[in-house]
Amino acid sequence: SAVISQKPSRDICQRGTSLTIQCQVDSQVTMMFWYRQQPGQSLTLIATANQGSEATYESGFVIDKFPISRPNLTFSTLTVSNMSPEDSSIYLCSATGGFDQPQHFGDGTRLSIL
Amino acid sequence: AQSVTQLDSQVPVFEEAPVELRCNYSSSVSVYLFWYVQYPNQGLQLLLKYLSGSTLVKGINGFEAEFNKSQTSFHLRKPSVHISDTAEYFCAVSDPAGGSYIPTFGRGTSLIVHP
């Protein structure tokens, strides 16, 4: 199974700044996703990271706020732009080899905005 | 679009007692079903999955789940829990035949095992 390294594990940021989260997979995977998880709540899909093209965003999430890159099959970044306290959350990266296969998750980035 | 309902937000249980965590999904012809566990400060990891075949699925750490098509349920069970099973459990469903390739997650059930 794939091992996912996500960095940073946590950060405290000032409002109005931006933070880029990195996700590295130890093997080539077909799909990579970015989720947001509010404390004590379920996962909300932000977008599917597409290799070499623009990410596919879910309703309520836009590229200007959450730009995503995926330059190859094993690496992706999510940027949280112009942060506000409402962006305080856990951000999770996941990857899978196919829709009939389980997703593998990173340990998450715990983000707090002051 | 698929929806997933985990009716119990929190399930307290004593150590060595049996437990069942409930998961229901909206109806479809064929679905893929998953249970994940999330320990504090970690990401989710797969407990078990159902794609097709036998309706009773065995997973890691002594967990099992039963797919019930008529009741559109996929409840998770363990006959005897340990303190270390205290965690958040998520049910997830995808519906490739219906176009929902990416799994939809339930809101999670917090399993709290007391000594």
Image (tube, rainbow, N blue to C red):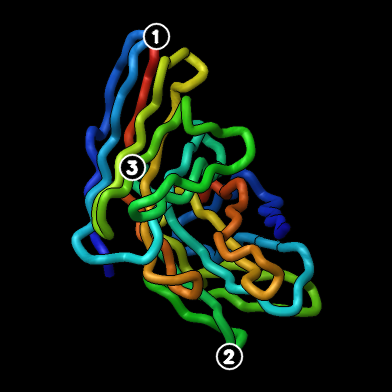
Q: Residue at x 33, y 42 (%)?
A: A69
- State if disc 2 and disc 3 touch (CB < 8 Å): no
Q: Residue furthest left?
A: A26
The residue indicated by pointer 2 is B54
Element marked by disc 1: loop
Q: Nearer the viewer, mark 1 or mark 3?
A: 3
* B96 versus A76 height, above or below: below
The residue indicated by pointer 1 is A15
Which three-letter amino acid code belongs to the residue tagged 2? Ser
Q: Nearer the viewer, mark 2 or mark 1?
A: 1
Q: Residues within 10 Å of mark 1 (few under 14, many from 20)?
A: some
Q: Is residue B83 visible?
A: no
Q: Whole-percent x and y of residue B43?
A: 36, 48
Q: Whole-percent x and y of residue B103?
A: 56, 60
Q: Whole-percent x and y of residue B113?
A: 46, 50
Q: Residue at x 31, y 48 (%)?
A: A70
Which numbered disc, 1 or 3, marks the residue that appears first in the sequence?
A: 1
- The answer as to whether the residues below labels 2 and 1 share one chain is no
Element marked by disc 2: loop
Q: Residues within 10 Å of mark 2 (few under 14, many from 20)?
A: few
Q: Whole-percent x and y of residue B81?
A: 45, 62
Q: Residues within 10 Å of mark 3 (few under 14, many from 20)?
A: some
**Whole-Å distance between the Cαs marked 2 and 1?**
51 Å
* A34 versus A9 height, above or below: below
**Whole-Å distance between the Cαs marked 3 and 2?**
40 Å
Q: Chain of mark 3?
A: A
